[in-house]
Image (cartoon, rainbow, N blue to C red):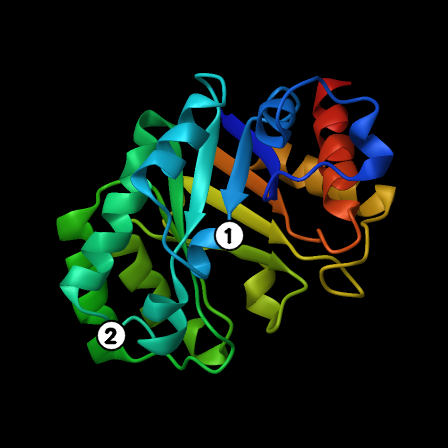
Amino acid sequence: MKSLRIGTAGWSIPKQFAATSPHGTHLVRYSQIFNCAEINSSFYRSHRHSTWEKWANSVPDGFRFSVKAPKTITHEAKLACTQAQLQNFLTEANALGGKLGTILFQLPPSSVFNPTTAKTFFPMLRDLYSGNTVIEPRHATWFTPEVDDLLQRFQVARVAADPARVPQAAYSAGWGELIYCRLHGSPRIYYSSYPATYLRSLSAIIAAHPAKEIWCIFDNTASGAAFGDAQSLKHLFAS
């Protein structure tokens, strides 16, 4: 059976939805509504082992987190990181135990595909970590058959993003067993909510897709739209 995960970047509950959510901490309440969340704070800083464990212990058994890789790896090193940098990050994320679902590497828009760097990074990553991995490149040089073949070889899925910086970015590629949609809000990125017509179309695409695991993460959190959009998409599958 297909595994479908719908959630948001972070787990804040906007005021307009607070009255209808369960009791407890934000994460506890959130995890009673959705079955996944994307941890973005890891992009900016490290967290204590106890923090990762606390998050894992706050959610039900079936809940999973995706974890965004730090900017030191994706934006500063542009994947040309040391093994120690990558290992340190993965050691932190693995503190989630069985609640770790996916690792996300989001690259800056200026990050051009470098074959030498990629052919060093992906084998190093797979030597250290065998779990679900997705990458969100944003430069046009990443959207080629050569890159797609490389991602397939190392079982890395390319994010399906909205809005798409290049047309191909709207569609998933690479490893086909995992689809990871990052919905940033359109037309105003991080702010705009999605119309019902878009969400119905998205639900139909998801329902028809053969991938074994599909994630839909709403990142339009600046105005609180993500929570409502995620609820609406979830209800479409429940109806």
* 2 or 1: tag closer to the N-terminus: 1
115 to 103, vertically: above or below: below
Crowd rating for badge 2 (residues with CA inside 10 Å; few <14, some 14–19, many 20+): some
Residue at (48, 83) in percent of width and height: 110
Residue at (34, 69) in percent of width and height: 72
Crowd rating for badge 1 (residues with CA inside 10 Å; few <14, some 14–19, many 20+): some
- The dot on residue 80 is 2
Name the residue beneath numbered marker 1: 40
Residue 44: give x, y in percent of width and height: 45, 61
13 to 142, vertically: above or below: above
Q: In the displayed structure, does residue 186 sit left or right of residue 89?
A: right
Mark 2 residue element: loop
122 to 193, vertically: above or below: below
**Residue 135 appears anywhere in the view:** no
Residue at (36, 77) in percent of width and height: 76
Residue 227: give x, y in percent of width and height: 73, 39
Q: In the displayed structure, does residue 233 sit left or right of residue 121?
A: right
Quarter that holds the C terminus: top right
